[in-house]
Image (cartoon, coloured by chain):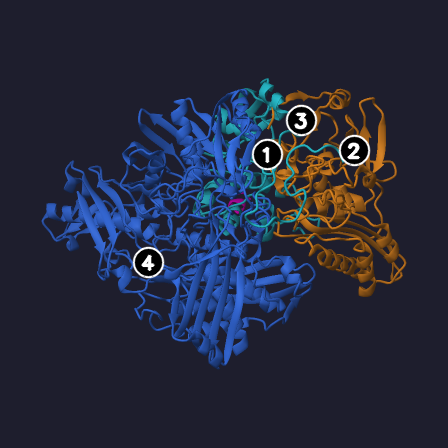
């Protein structure tokens, strides 16, 4: 029995506020916590599958030419080797998020150095690794290919072009203006769990134990890659060791494992080696962004320009959407925007946490800091003066927007009023500065389904192929069901990560919680109605709490109402008119204190605070953790993270965790987070918006702006490594 | 990782004999196994020397310290004598790697670490250190972390150790034993070779020769520090590091033992820099002159050009710190 | 210079113009290195090595390919998948276990090198329903998100607290000859060998502090 819900009108009834269990929003521990802290949660490459053998993938040593495995037959004879597989169905690169079909296949023509072109399978991992390392991969008839975005051919993305009013004139007439170019390097998601898949076949049916974020799409991508019907494919991903975009789309190891397992008639595990994760999954595109701001004497914007260049492999449509929040964050009636996509032969560019805003808002926030300096006003005040009344391009209302409150409350919480003047504070050899930036990220609701079963024993079961990649899905879906059905949290079981369950929106784009949460809510509403029918009362007059039903001044145990029956409902939500009727986004503000070493230029983040508004918070503990993660990504973007491409062949030179510097514990101070109370009726019937990415969208700018405040050095070329800082000291 | 024969050595005699026959010693294994997994190193035989009794720290007759080759980085850093009398060594060790790695990495192994050059680590790239004659991919590649001193046209690798930099400033001596039972003592500086046209040869050790200990001379007067500059606050290799032992008397510098990490194929020490400082009154101009001397022959290769100003600034800062403290 | 083996990529230096054909012999993996010829590879056999060790209090006798790391022995041969493989090169700390009470990266050591050793993995620290103080604090402080680095964090923290109790200094300890205090800065530095991409760091620090207070 499906309960269908389309988000065509604002959900002003706010039913969650009527409920009595008190679960939604509460900072509850993750129910799967005890499994994770004891090492008993099972990740992809940890299933003990009878008869399993091991595959190790082999890379192309260049970015051009036909792949020839010149000693394939010899390698096939090495101890323990079962097969050396080169197959046209192997993937050239991973699928983009929500692709829903196979990405470009046929890796027999090299497109980038690191492309995975074959898989060697052996009885043991040690044998497979050595055999893979023994395979000689030659590339024939290659040519020198573009790897540098500055010189590669570009394709203007016409659908991204905006020309409103006359920005050139506004710049000329402006009292104060900023016209600067900022660059950000490629970033890697670098989840702690490398991509891994175990494939096993039973007849024509394939089971893949993988590490993926969006199973309903991944299933179709895998089926399409293999040329089989999706009904034949089951994917299991109950635990995912981090994704951050890199596991949105099907990756090469899954198809390799499936092909090998079919050929050998045995389960095959293929895990990417860490360098392969860096070289053959996804990168965030590097960007070159020109920001133009035109302002009057008071800093009120009359013009806003954002022109960018990003890059990708030939054949890939994804272009890092850096303009996304520029369309609505600030006022300015003369607006110009454009996006160019350079075609080159580095690994595939795709989604890395908050594609677009993570680097787009960041440089806008640097430019705003430069403008505040020119106008001579508090950077917070500059932002406050430029909050547009309505969407500055479409004129649409904002669904909800506690942007002003985030700026003001964040400034208070941080102690912004005590900020030092430019280059004013020095403590020994350390130069100390404060910086701030705004946060903004678009919000979306996506189609999602979940089945909720109220069992005769008074327990409930939530089932969906939704994933929990650390985001807190296990926690919040249980909280929503418990809240709606009046059950303590420990009487709700949540089952995730299995494509035999109802298809969910998946974890990505910050839409997972509100979308899959709404599907659970919709199912629960249907269950409540059926309970009400049984009791012959109106659903709104039912009070469910602690496994008891109160209605018409009587109270009954849930079991007595159910009388041995179970009630199962499938909740199915689809986005509707509210997606386009209003502008939906989340907002916030970051504040940072840094210390820059006067001799070495090393920067330490001493304090950092974020105030965020993202609709109803479903679990204050896991939501805060999401913000901590985002802000830490921001520290990485600001100070350390950069994929270093070799200038000659575009390969990832720093393809490991020792040289691609994600922040370590000592890089991160005790961050503080404030979650502002908000209800967004347009976003979902939960009044919740996404919060998984908001913490990163501009965070790096608070740090680089603080470096400026401390040192007077503007680093416009990310990351602000010490070499760039000392160059200006 | 290629297959290998594994033996557990019961004595230095059997260990050195096996090694003379082509086996490679393994102690902590934190660098060797890293490289073996990538087949950058591919020994056919491994001799596990962890059972040899080379894990003690003993005082020498002249007030120094003999550190067994198998003493772990943790045990050495935490030794109360080292913390008190050779703090620069303790500091250098604690600035290196992570708690886990320091528990495994040994004194002898740390000295023999291979470079972190990204092209050395990648078998698809030409590297004269890995494969003599294949070329150097790093010179025109991403060489941010590589050397500015002591390089050759064939190699610009850096030695990654922190510990060895401090030991170099402390005039440490390396003791070895060969398969014929003979022993020798090498100044740390003499252990290492510059790349020249054979960057694959990194030390003067002969096949079968085993480092048994490192000897620190008696502690000297003066202030000690280890300054490590890196891309993260922790768990990152040095871009530049300075180990300094500086003594003052009557307002003049009487000792300036300075060794540098992250800038050269071996822990770098320049006697002319020290000669220029000793006997002088500390001043910023003097420190700048010392830096001029240190960097007179330095050469960057693009992405690592910044190491020249960074080394200068770090040296000046360290000298300022050590001489200021000495004056107060 | 000795004879050239292997590829000559980048050897001549400089960049060729785009579209020009690549010289022959470019873009190939190595034919030979360190004397390891293809024939050696094909013929190379390994002989299992016997190792006796105690894991979480239980005696184990392993007979494994000597190439097997302690981590792979745990994960592939003993069914102990609590220790995680994040990088396999000692760069992330997800594989941290304790050997004879000390934390190490189990990916960077061979199982056969641990004959007679006592190994404690996350499975030996606590189980669901029987959590250690640290495990409990990680749950209550949300000291993890995806959970993949978590067993390594907890093994590392367990041993780290012992190191502090033993008076070991760290990189951020001001006085090398004094006692070590468990400040935020000290915890962060000492835990920096355990990467967490979800970045639960502030919560990890809080969890460790809380557990240490409870134990003290």
Q: Which residues are magenta?
A: C211-216
How far, Cα to Cα, is label 1 from label 3? 19 Å
Same subunit, tags 1 and 2? no
How far, Cα to Cα, is label 1 from label 4? 55 Å
Report helix, strand or loop for mark 2.
Answer: strand
Give residue C29's mark.
Answer: 1
User: What is the crowding at mark 3: few (fewer than 14 residues within 10 Å), some, or many (at least 20)?
Assistant: many
How far, Cα to Cα, is label 4 from label 3? 60 Å
Give residue A616's mark.
Answer: 4
How far, Cα to Cα, is label 2 from label 4? 64 Å
- Chain letter of disc 3 in the image: B
Q: Nearer the viewer, residue C45 or A557?
A: C45
The spot of residue A618 in percent (x, y) is 34, 53
Judged left or right of residue A631, residue A525 is: left
How far, Cα to Cα, is label 1 from label 2? 39 Å
Q: Do residues under tags 2 and 3 come within 8 Å of each other at their CB atoms? A: no
């Amino acid at each position: 029995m499906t309960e269908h819900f389309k988000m065509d009108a604002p959900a002003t009834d706010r039913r969650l506020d009527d409920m009595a269990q008190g679960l939604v929003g509460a900072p509850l521990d993750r129910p799967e916590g005890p499994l994770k802290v004891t090492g008993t949660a099972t990740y992809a490459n940890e299933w003990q599958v009878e008869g399993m053998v091991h595959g190790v993938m082999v890379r192309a040593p260049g970015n051009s030419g036909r792949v020839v495995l010149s000693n394939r037959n010899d390698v096939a004879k090495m101890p323990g080797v079962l097969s050396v597989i080169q197959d046209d169905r192997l993937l050239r690169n991973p699928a983009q998020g929500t692709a829903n079909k196979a990405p470009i296949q046929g890796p027999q023509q090299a497109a980038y150095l690191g492309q995975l072109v074959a898989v060697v399978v052996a009885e043991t991992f040690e044998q497979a690794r050595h055999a893979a390392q023994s395979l000689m991969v030659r590339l024939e008839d290659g040519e020198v290919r573009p790897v540098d975005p500055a010189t590669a051919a570009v394709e203007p993305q016409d659908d991204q072009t905006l020309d409103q009013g006359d920005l050139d004139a506004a710049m000329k007439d402006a009292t104060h203006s900023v016209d600067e170019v900022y660059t950000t390097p490629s970033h890697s998601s670098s989840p702690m769990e490398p991509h891994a898949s175990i494939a096993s076949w039973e007849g024509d049916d394939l089971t893949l134990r993988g590490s993926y974020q969006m199973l309903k799409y991944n299933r179709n991508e895998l089926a399409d890659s293999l040329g089989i019907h999706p009904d034949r494919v089951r994917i299991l991903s109950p635990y995912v060791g981090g994704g951050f975009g890199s596991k949105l789309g099907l990756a090469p190891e899954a198809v390799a494992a499936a092909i090998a397992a079919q050929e050998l008639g045995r389960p095959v595990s293929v895990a990417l080696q860490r360098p392969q994760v860096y070289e053959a999954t996804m990168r965030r595109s590097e960007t070159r962004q020109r920001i133009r701001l035109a302002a009057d004497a008071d800093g009120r914007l009359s013009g806003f320009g954002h022109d960018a260049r990003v890059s990708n492999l030939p054949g890939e449509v994804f272009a890092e959407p850096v303009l996304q929040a520029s369309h609505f964050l600030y006022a300015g009636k003369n607006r110009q925007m454009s996006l160019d996509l350079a075609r080159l032969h580095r690994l595939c560019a795709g989604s890395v946490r908050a594609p677009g805003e993570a680097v787009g808002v960041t440089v806008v926030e640097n430019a705003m800091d430069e403008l505040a300096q020119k106008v001579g006003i508090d950077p917070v005040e500059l932002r406050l003066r430029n909050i547009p009344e309505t969407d500055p391009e479409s004129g649409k209302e904002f669904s909800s927007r506690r942007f002003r409150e985030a700026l003001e409350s964040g400034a208070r919480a941080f102690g912004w009023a005590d900020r030092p003047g430019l280059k004013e504070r020095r403590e020994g050899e350390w130069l100390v500065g404060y910086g701030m930036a705004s946060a903004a990220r678009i919000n979306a609701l996506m189609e999602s389904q979940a089945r909720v079963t109220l069992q005769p024993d008074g327990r409930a079961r939530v089932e969906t192929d939704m994933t929990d990649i650390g985001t807190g899905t296990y926690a919040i879906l249980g909280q929503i069901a418990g809240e709606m059905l009046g059950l303590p949290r420990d009487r709700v079981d949540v089952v995730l990560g299995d494509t035999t369950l109802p298809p969910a929106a998946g974890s990505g784009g910050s839409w997972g919680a509100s979308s899959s949460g709404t599907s659970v809510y919709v199912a629960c509403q249907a269950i409540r109605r059926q309970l009400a029918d049984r009791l012959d009362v109106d659903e709104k007059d039912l009070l469910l709490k602690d496994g008891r039903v109160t209605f018409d001044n009587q109270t009954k145990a849930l079991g007595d109402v159910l009388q041995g029956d179970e009630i199962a409902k499938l909740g199915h939500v689809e986005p509707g008119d509210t997606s386009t009727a209003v502008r939906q986004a989340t907002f916030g503000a970051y504040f940072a204190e840094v210390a820059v070493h006067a001799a070495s230029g090393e920067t330490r983040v001493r304090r950092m605070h974020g105030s965020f508004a993202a609709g109803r918070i479903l679990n204050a503990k896991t939501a805060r953790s999401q913000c901590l993660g985002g802000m830490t990504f921001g520290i990485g973007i600001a100070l350390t993270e950069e994929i270093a491409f070799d200038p000659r062949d575009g390969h990832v030179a720093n393809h490991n965790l020792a040289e691609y510097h994600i922040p370590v514990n000592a890089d991160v101070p005790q961050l503080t987070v404030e979650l502002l109370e908000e209800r967004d009726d347009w976003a979902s019937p939960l009044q919740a918006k996404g919060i998984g990415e908001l913490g990163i969208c501009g965070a790096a700018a608070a740090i680089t702006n603080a470096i400026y405040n401390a040192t007077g050095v503007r680093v416009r070329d990310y990351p602000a490594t010490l070499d760039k800082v000392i160059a200006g000291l | 990782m290629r297959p290998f024969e594994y033996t557990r050595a019961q004595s230095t005699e059997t260990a050195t004999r096996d090694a003379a026959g082509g086996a490679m010693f393994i102690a902590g294994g934190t660098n060797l196994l890293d490289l073996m997994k990538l087949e950058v190193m591919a020994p056919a035989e491994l001799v596990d020397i962890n059972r040899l009794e080379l894990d003690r720290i003993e005082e020498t007759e002249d007030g120094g310290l003999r550190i067994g080759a198998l003493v772990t980085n943790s045990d050495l850093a935490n030794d109360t004598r080292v913390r008190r009398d050779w703090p620069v060594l303790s500091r250098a060790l604690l600035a290196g790697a992570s708690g886990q790695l320091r528990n495994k990495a040994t004194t002898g192994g740390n000295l023999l670490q291979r470079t972190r050059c990204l092209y050395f680590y990648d078998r698809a790239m030409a590297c004269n250190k890995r494969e003599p004659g294949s070329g150097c991919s790093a010179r025109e590649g991403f060489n941010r972390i590589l050397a500015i001193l002591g390089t050759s046209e064939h190699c610009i690798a850096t030695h990654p150790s922190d510990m060895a930099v401090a030991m170099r400033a402390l005039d440490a001596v390396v003791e070895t034993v060969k398969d014929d039972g003979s022993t020798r003592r090498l100044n740390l500086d003499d252990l290492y070779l510059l790349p020249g046209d054979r960057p694959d040869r990194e030390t003067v050790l002969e096949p079968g020769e085993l480092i048994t200990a490192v000897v620190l001379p008696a502690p000297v007067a003066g202030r000690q520090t280890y300054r490590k500059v890196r891309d993260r606050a922790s768990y990152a290799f040095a871009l530049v590091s300075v180990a300094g032992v500086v003594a003052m008397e009557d307002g003049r510098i009487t000792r300036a033992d300075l060794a540098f990490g992250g800038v050269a194929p071996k822990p770098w020490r320049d006697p002319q820099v020290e000669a220029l400082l000793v006997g002088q009154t500390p001043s910023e101009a003097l420190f700048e002159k010392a830096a001029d001397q240190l960097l007179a022959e330095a050469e960057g290769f693009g992405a690592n050009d910044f190491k020249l100003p960074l080394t200068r600034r770090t040296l000046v800062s360290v000298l300022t710190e050590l001489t200021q403290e000495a004056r107060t | 210079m000795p004879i050239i083996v292997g590829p000559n990529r980048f050897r001549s230096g400089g960049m060729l113009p785009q579209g020009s054909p690549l010289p022959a012999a470019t873009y190939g993996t190595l034919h030979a290195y360190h004397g390891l010829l293809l024939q050696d590879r094909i013929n190379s056999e390994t002989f299992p090595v016997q190792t006796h060790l105690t894991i979480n209090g239980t005696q184990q006798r392993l007979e494994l390919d000597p190439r097997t790391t302690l981590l792979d022995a745990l994960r592939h041969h003993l069914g102990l998948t609590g220790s995680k493989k994040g990088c396999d090169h000692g760069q992330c700390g997800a594989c941290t276990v304790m050997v004879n009470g000390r934390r190490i990266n189990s990916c960077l050591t061979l199982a056969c090198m641990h004959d007679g050793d006592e190994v404690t993995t996350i499975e030996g620290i606590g189980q669901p329903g029987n959590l250690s103080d640290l495990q409990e604090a990680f749950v209550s402080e949300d000291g993890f998100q995806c959970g993949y680095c978590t067993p390594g964090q907890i093994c590392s923290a367990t041993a780290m607290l012992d190191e502090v109790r033993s008076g070991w200094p760290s990189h951020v300890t001001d006085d090398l000859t004094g006692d070590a205090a468990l400040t935020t800065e000290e915890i962060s530095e000492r835990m920096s060998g355990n990467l967490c991409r979800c970045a639960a760091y502030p919560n990890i620090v809080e969890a460790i502090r809380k557990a240490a207070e409870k134990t003290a």
